[in-house]
Amino acid sequence: MNLLTLMETVGENQTLALGGLLIGLCFGYLAQRSRFCLRSAVIETCHGQLGGKLAVWLLAFGAAVSLTQLFILAGVLDVGSARQLATRGTVSGALVGGALFGCGMILARGCASRLLILAGTGNLRALLSGLVFAVVAQASLGGMLAPLRLAISDWWTIDGGNARDLLLWFHASHGAGLAFGLAWLIGGLAFAWRARLGPWPVLAGLACGAMVACAWLFNYQVSAQAFELVPVKSLSFTGPAADMLMLVLSPPGKPWNFDVGLVPGVALGAFLGGLRGRELKLEGFKDGLSMRRYLIGAACMGLGGMLAGGCAVGAGVSGAAVFALTAWLTLFAIWGAAAATDALMDRPGV
């Protein structure tokens, strides 16, 4: 059964939700088994270890960039209408939001996707932090924090289209984008060899990145054949977490979409990964101090993710894979703020 037949059989919205579920399930399983985590990669880099966790992140990042650019070169993917490129963006939102997200990621011991994955394996700290993240994200989107988000976003904006495309900035082709992604991939393989990673973590890390490219491809192919407007998008967890919260709290009847399948799919995949590795375990907070730290971090990520237009995966990998300027600014801000926060938290007495 091809994609068009599936859409005619079950409906466009249901097809999107099913695709989100399957891609999310694969991503959740692979991320849980490979320990894919930007926070861990940042900490390893800051401590000068340059080990397996950095290698896994580099492998996923390199695979996402390379495969996405390969799809574009092959003519099966067009990201020109994607929000990260087509619409007006905010440089101030990317920088401030990325910094908030990076700080929160260290405090909460995981980014938005990592909290969802840990929650799927029974981590109650991550579950509560994830709920706070979703509430603050929704409040930043259309609630009491929306005026603050809009004010910061308006400090420095940039036009959509060519102004947000880094490849056009440097007069580079998608072939150059592919070569750039392969360079990151080779770097990841070098670090994996140095850290003596086995074949499974390497393959799982590569497959995590491939899920980002597959999500771009799937949503584009549905949009190209759908009667109604379907956004071209990839993996992200800030907006989807807020949408899932509202879906649960609102009366039944809201239309399904890719994000409706993605969030439960990732949680289910993480559960299956934990089950496969015998790592399912209920864990709670150690004390009130650690609880405050987690919840403050989750709140920072909720506001930061909405300001930046994406999380460590949504902006830092999905947006970077299509060379969106604001996505790369967000990624740099996340790394910088996370490194500074980790250095501060590492100080004696903190």
Image (cartoon, rainbow, N blue to C red):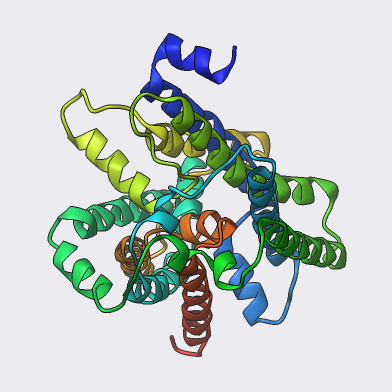
**Viewer-side residue, 17 vs 123:** 17
Quadrant of the rendering where the C terminus is positioned = bottom left
| Residue positioned most to the bottom | 348
Quadrant of the rendering where the N terminus is positioned = top right
Is 177 on the left or on the right of 115, as rendered? right
**Viewer-side residue, 331 vs 199:** 331
Q: Position of residue 72 (x, y in %)?
A: 63, 46
Residue at image point 65% right, 38% down: 278
Rendered view: 175 above or below 106? above
Residue 214 appearing in the image: yes
Residue at image point 19% right, 73% down: 151
Residue at image point 24% right, 75% down: 152
Rendered view: 204 above or below 45? above
Number of labels in the image equals 0
Q: Position of residue 2 (x, y in %)?
A: 59, 16
Q: Position of residue 73 (x, y in %)?
A: 68, 47
Q: Position of residue 81 (x, y in %)?
A: 43, 47
- Quadrant hosting residue 269: top right
Residue 145 appearing in the image: no
Rendered view: 21 above or below 67? above
- Quadrant hosting residue 92: bottom left
